Image: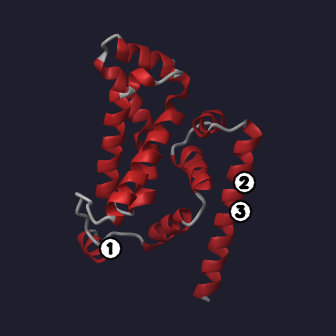
Amino acid sequence: MTIPSDRKLIQAVFAGENTAYEKLYDRYAPLVRAICYDTTRNLADAQDLAQDVFMRAYEKLGHLRDPECFGKWLVGIARLRCKEWRRQRAQGRDKHVGLDDAELATANPSNDDRIEQLREMIAALPPKERLALHTFYLQDKSADNARRIMGLSRSGFYRVLDRARKRLEQLLVQEQENIR
């Protein structure tokens, strides 16, 4: 069974096939949630933002010029929505109420501190490097798909990914030295 391209799925959406957008959602939702989580640091808020991103994308799907660039276009919408969310938070008008870290830790006692540390270290990376890690490792995308989503050449993507890995390694080494 072949996996349909973004172009074919978008054509199916326009043809009225309801499941086509669901397939696009399933393909890109983890990446969009990761981008949103980088901004919110709260899973519930990240999920809400991700849903909003997909609703906006669906409403504006007719404006997408190249269906093969759907992933890159969606990432742009996610970044814009996250920027709006930060602005709303700064103005004190955020409609989302999230649990603070203490409440979250008590609500989920199986919370692994190491995973949270890794999330914080990834969050400390520059946005382009975080996106490279998310698309390639966390989304398990091929390098070719990941570079297209990011709008980079193959060598450019590998340079960004390499910088991200090296920077993350430095952060891990620093953390280990702080523990000793």
User: Alpha-carbon neighbours of circle 2 within 10 Å: few (<14), some, or many (≥20)?
Assistant: some
The residue labelled by disc 1 is: 101
The residue labelled by disc 3 is: 166
Q: Is residue 15 left or right of residue 178?
A: left
Residue 109: x %, y % from top left: 29, 72
Q: Residue at 41% of width from left, 29% of height from top?
A: 24
The residue labelled by disc 2 is: 162
Q: Residue at 31% of width from left, 15% of height from top?
A: 17
Q: Is residue 169 above or below residue 80?
A: below
Upstream in the sequence, badge 3 or badge 1?
A: 1
Residue 129: x %, y % from top left: 62, 54
Residue 130: x %, y % from top left: 57, 55
Amino acid type, mark 2: Asp
Badges 2 and 3: C-beta atoms under 8 Å apart? yes
Q: Is residue 92 above or below residue 4?
A: below
Mark sitting on residue 174 = none
- Residue sitting farthest toward the right: 155
Residue 62 picture quarter: top left
Q: Which of these two is toward me, 56 or 36?
A: 56
Amino acid type, mark 1: Asp
Upstream in the sequence, badge 2 or badge 1?
A: 1
Q: Residue at 67% of width from left, 75% of height from top?
A: 173
Distance between the alpha carbons at the discs numbered 2 and 1: 31 Å
The answer to whether any part of residue 52 appears in the image is yes
Distance between the alpha carbons at the discs numbered 3 and 1: 29 Å
Task: State the SS at label 3.
Answer: helix
Amino acid type, mark 3: Lys
Task: State the SS at label 2.
Answer: helix
Distance between the alpha carbons at the discs numbered 2 and 3: 6 Å
User: Alpha-carbon neighbours of circle 1 within 10 Å: few (<14), some, or many (≥20)?
Assistant: few
Residue 161: x %, y % from top left: 68, 51
